[in-house]
Amino acid sequence: MEVRIAALADRCVKCGLCLPHCPTYRLAATEAESPRGRIAFAQALAEGKLERTPSILAHLDNCLACMACERVCPSKVQYGELIATTRAWLADTGAQTRPARVLGWLLAKPRLLGMMLRMANLPGLRQALQGRVIRALLRPFGMDRMLAELPRLPRVQVAPSRIPAAPRGRIGLFLGCVAASVDRDVHAAATSLLHALGIEVVLPRGQGCCGALALHNGDAVQANSLGSALRAAFEGAGVETVLVSASGCFGTLRDHVFADSKLRVREVHEFLSADSGFDTLKFRALPERIAVHAPCTQRNVARADGAIARLLARIPQLQIDALPAPPGCCGAAGDYFLRHPETADALRAQTLDATLAQSPQTLLTSNVGCRVFLGNGLRECGAEIPVTHPLVLLARQLEN
Ligand code: SF4
Ligand code: SF4
């Protein structure tokens, strides 16, 4: 791994063009919290030129893996692979502990996770769990933050759609782990839109987590085990395409889980906007102002933010305001908001300020983690702005 890390880092010409795009550099304004600084640390550690001090390990751990640096790098430094390999190497050699073991275990069991989320959202229980006493009791185990940011489960407001009688295509829909419960409305919306296009939707049994969290935290063994189970579930489902509605999972599915598979991974907005039938669908007018938050993974990995804008433009009278490009990451970033609450809250505050300044009637975002984190943040501010997924809005307005 050391050779690979050094080779990846060697591509960096230290131009610094990525620095203004890095959320942690913008907050801390120090080289050590920048992509260039982290690349230099990783290279020096891999080449044995630097001691593994707690401070250097912390700078590497503070990276959100938002990939803003990779997107703008003129030298095409593969930063995502570099940080994941460095973290895996440091964890394998005992220099860095792998975080989120409990959460990682739970994510591998979406049904159990869903059951726990349903119970935690029972009337009265949610307030009790988020009360001061229980949170104080669970603080020593690091679970108070998890309770404070407990996801809410959506009421599925999309009418069930009819399966096309003579389908013109068949796709497999990826449900995910947290998203299997928290994005149930998104999956219903995606199914409605696809059915309206005459496309049959298959939900392969036994599908689970894509392993993104494990991969980002340097746990290649767990990431590979989750990826193999997921690949087997889809390969046995008789589909050629895997559609993904959570942008945070898309890169892991495309570049790791299905990298060597015949199955094609497509981002759902890109898929819908490329379908010639989409222009024939009719949408009810919606005279509302909405703001669109583009998650880092949507902009820097899936690169499908343009497709979302094209789809939403089909809703008559909808006034769409994109949130300003900076501040970039909203701070959710997988389990980052649990492990780095101060940085995550500072980044969330920037996104919330930008949202409140536009005072939209709804905030749209296409990643489940951002949806939960921003929704909780808006509620804490006392702002009654619902946060939902672009597909849910499209399916609600669909006339066909
Ligand atoms: S990562 Fe790319 S953009 Fe950033 S300093 Fe290195 S070469 Fe320049
Ligand atoms: S992935 Fe994001 S947080 Fe990490 S160094 Fe790159 S821009 Fe900064």
Image (spheres, rainbow, N blue to C red):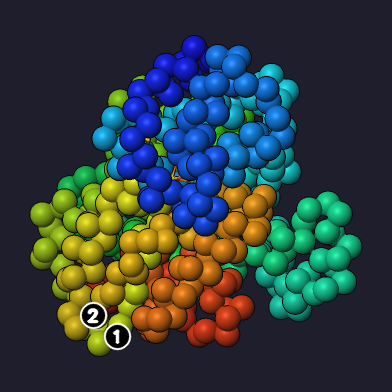
Residue type pointed to by label 1: Glu
| Mark toward the start of the polypeptide (1 vs 2) | 1
Q: Position of residue 377 (x, y in %)?
A: 57, 72
At 68% from the left edge and 70% from the top edge, which residue is drawn?
121
The C terminus: image quadrant: bottom left
Q: Position of residue 151 (x, y in %)?
A: 61, 64
Image location of residue 9, percent across then percent down? 43, 24
- Establish if 34 lies above or below 341: above
In this view of the protein, can residue 180 be seen by the observer? no
State the mark number for residue 318. 2
Locate residue 398 relative to residue 58 in the image: left or right: left
**Quadrant of the rendered image containing residue 192:** bottom left
User: Residue at 43% across / 49% down in the picture?
Assistant: 22
Task: Decide: is 315 above or below 259.
Answer: below
- Could one spot residue 295 in this view of the protein? yes
Bin the neighbour count of mark 1 within 10 Å (Cα to Cα): few under 14, some 14-19, many 20 and up.
few
Contact flag, marks 1 and 2 (Cβ < 8 Å) = yes
Q: How many marks?
A: 2
Crowd class of label 2 (few under 14; some 14 to 19; many from 20; radius 10 Å): some
**Type of amino acid under label 2:** Leu
Q: Quadrant of residue 77?
A: top left
Q: Nearer the viewer, residue 219 or 354?
A: 354
| Disc 1: which residue | 288
